[in-house]
């Protein structure tokens, strides 16, 4: 086996396109998972079980079915119901929805970790419920869970290659396409592996530093 630097040069334009798609899917999927996860967590604290039970059932179903199955369902089944989105939009929605069920648990742990005295102080000050959540509870809860949320961002990054299954040409999709056309697999796949390492390793170090800073 010989290393062909010309193949690396030929692949780089495709790699840049795939990298942009990967980062776009990661950023948008993360935003959806963070926002929707917080919504799920708040709904699970609703005083009525008629809200908690449906939310719990939906999130358990999503969390316990594979992301790949959800991608196929959204991409191939929804159009039969006249609901059609682009492949990238479908992939972003699937990743965001899937991981929102995990970030929900992170938020719940953060909220439950807020000392009871904070709730009592808000009640003693006669703060409205909305003010209690936005000014007292959520700032403390989110501060506690930022490192855990960051870990899920890294997990989402490693799951973006699944978007290739619904025709999204992210990094691995571009590498696969190039390899099939040129019958060269070592160079593009090595570049993709290094790219994931160069993105996820610094992110892990930053998360550890952030965690140390937040727990002070």
Image: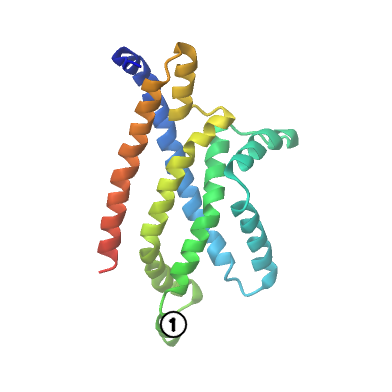
Within 10 Å of disc 1 (Cα), the crowding (few <14, some 14-19, many 20+) is: few
Q: Is residue 214 left or right of residue 119?
A: left
Placement of 36 over or under 121, stated as above or below: above
Residue 50, picture quadrant: bottom right
Name the residue: 42% across, 16% down.
184
Name the residue: 54% across, 64% down.
41
Find disc 1 in the rendering and name its residue: 116
- The percent position of residue 177, horizontal first and vertical second, equals 49, 19
Frontmost residue, 133 versus 141? 141
Name the residue: 38% across, 53% down.
150
User: Which residue extends farthest bottom?
Assistant: 124
- The percent position of residue 178, horizontal first and vertical second, equals 45, 17
Say what secondary structure mark 1 lies in: helix
Placement of 149 over or under 183, stated as above or below: below
Quadrant in the picture for the C terminus: bottom left
Placement of 158 over or under 46, stated as above or below: above
Quadrant in the picture for the N terminus: top left
């Amino acid at each position: 086996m010989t290393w062909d630097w010309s193949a690396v040069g030929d692949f780089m334009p495709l790699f840049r396109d795939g990298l942009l798609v990967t980062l776009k899917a990661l950023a948008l999927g993360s935003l959806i998972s963070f926002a929707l996860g917080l919504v799920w967590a708040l709904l699970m604290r609703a005083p009525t079980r008629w809200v908690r039970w449906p939310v719990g059932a939906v999130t358990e179903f999503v969390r316990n079915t594979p992301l790949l199955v959800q991608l196929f369902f959204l991409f191939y089944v929804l159009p039969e119901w006249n609901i059609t989105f682009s492949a990238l939009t479908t992939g972003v929605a699937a990743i965001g929805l899937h991981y929102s069920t995990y970030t929900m648990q992170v938020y719940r742990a953060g909220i439950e970790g807020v000392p009871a005295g904070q709730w009592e102080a808000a009640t003693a000050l006669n703060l409205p419920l909305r003010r209690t959540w936005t000014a007292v509870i959520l700032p403390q809860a989110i501060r506690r869970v930022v490192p855990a949320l960051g870990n899920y961002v890294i997990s989402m990054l490693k799951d973006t290659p699944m978007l290739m299954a619904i025709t999204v040409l992210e990094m691995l999709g571009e590498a696969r396409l190039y390899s099939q056309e040129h019958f060269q697999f070592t160079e593009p796949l090595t570049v993709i592996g290094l790219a994931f390492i160069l993105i996820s390793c610094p992110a892990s170090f930053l998360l550890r530093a952030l965690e140390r800073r937040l727990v002070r």
